[in-house]
């Protein structure tokens, strides 16, 4: 039980540091408070649309790591 509490405390300190020093990209959604892969989808779609409208090359790769953590 104490180990879980320490992990949560360390994770909170790490996130505070990363946010304070703006180390994470604004487009980083996973592993952040109130952000998930689902909240990233509209952002990604907007970026894809901008690239397509500008005629820029666009490649999209979907990776599903969930099976690796079962």
Image (spheres, grey):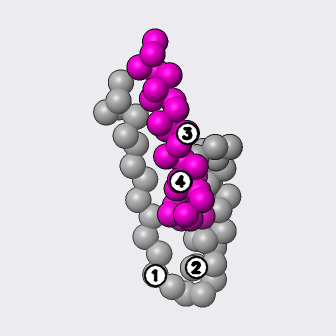
* Membership of 12 in magenta stretch: yes
Which of 22/34 is in front? 22
* Residue found at x 55% / y 87%: 55
Q: CA distance from mark 4 to mark 1?
A: 36 Å
Q: Which residue is mark 2?
A: 52
List x then y, in percent, for residue 14.
Answer: 49, 46
Q: Which residue has dot 4 on it? A: 17
Location of residue 28 by image quarter: bottom right
Among the two numbered marks 1 and 3 on one chain, the one whose residue lies closer to the N terminus = 3
Q: Which mark is residue 12?
A: 3
**Is mark 3 in CB contact (under 8 Å) with mark 4?**
no
Which residue has dot 1 on it?
Answer: 57
What separation in Å lies between label 1 and label 2 (alpha carbons)? 7 Å
The reply to whether callout 4 and callout 2 are in contact (CB within 8 Å) is no
Q: Residues within 10 Å of mark 3 (few under 14, many from 20)?
A: few
Can residue 31 be seen in this snapshot? no
Q: Secondary structure at mark 4?
A: helix
Span of residues in magenta:
1-29
Mark found first going from the N terminus, 4 or 2: 4
Check residue 2 for magenta coloring. yes
> Which element type, helix, strand or loop, lies under badge 2?
helix
Residues at marks 3 and 4, CA–CA distance in whole angstroms: 9 Å
Q: Earlier in the sequence, mark 3 or mark 4?
A: 3
């Amino acid at each position: 039980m104490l180990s879980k509490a320490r992990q949560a405390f360390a994770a909170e300190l790490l996130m505070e540091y990363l946010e304070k020093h703006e180390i994470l990209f604004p487009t980083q959604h996973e592993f952040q408070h109130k952000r998930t892969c689902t909240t990233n989808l509209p952002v990604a779609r907007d970026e894809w649309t901008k690239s397509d409208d500008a005629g820029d090359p666009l490649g999209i790769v979907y990776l599903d790591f969930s099976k690796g953590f079962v």
